[in-house]
Amino acid sequence: MPRRPNLALVATAALCLGTAGAVSAQGPNDVLPDGPGKDVVVRVCTGCHEAAQIAEKPRTPEDWEYVIGKMIDGGAELTAPEQDAVYAYLVKAFPKAPAAAAPAPTAAAPPSPS
């Protein structure tokens, strides 16, 4: 009698092979969400920085404005409309979450009568 393949093993192997193909197809800029201005960020910013470096540190709008100014001072070439597009994209795509408020102090329980 011929031996039948273990279906669970075959299914697992097929799933792994399919996933490996999908993972290897990702590009270096896939960490950047789609949106208006992404094309400018990819063209201008990823010439010097990896997209992951941009995505790893969310910032406030003021921080993004400072970073963009610093990059322009360092030689990044952007027109005024491109600066606006990059700023709007980064502020929307990588916002810094507001600092969590400290928990309110809890009142001490009154002493129990003895």
Image (spheres, rainbow, N blue to C red):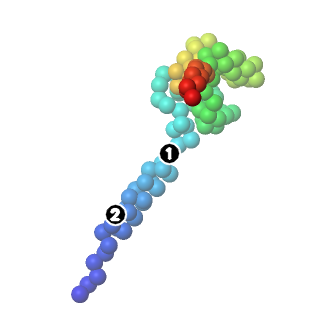
State the residue lying farthest toward the front. Answer: 114
* 39 horizontally vs 18: left or right: right
Q: Compared with residue 21, is residue 67 higher up or lower down, i.e. above or below?
A: above
- Does residue 86 appear in the picture of this structure? no
- Does residue 39 appear in the picture of this structure? yes
x and y, in percent, of residue 90 in the image: 57, 23
**Viewer-nearest of discs 2 and 1:** 2
Residue placed most toward the observer, 44 or 86: 86
* 79 horizontally vs 32: left or right: right
Where on the picture, by quarter, is residue 64? top right
Q: Which residue is mark 1?
A: 26
Count of number-bearing discs: 2
Residue placed most toward the observer, 104 or 72: 104
Q: Residue at x 48, y 50 (%)?
A: 23
Residue placed most toward the observer, 106 or 110: 110
The kind of residue tagged 2 is Ala
State the residue lying farthest toward the right. Answer: 74
Say the numbered circle drawn on residue 11.
Answer: 2
Q: Compared with residue 112, is residue 69 higher up or lower down, i.e. above or below?
A: above
Q: Residue at x 38, y 58 (%)?
A: 15
The kind of residue tagged 1 is Gln
Q: Compared with residue 68, is residue 22 higher up or lower down, i.e. above or below?
A: below
x and y, in percent, of residue 105 in the image: 60, 21
Describe the element under mark 1 as helix, strand or loop: loop
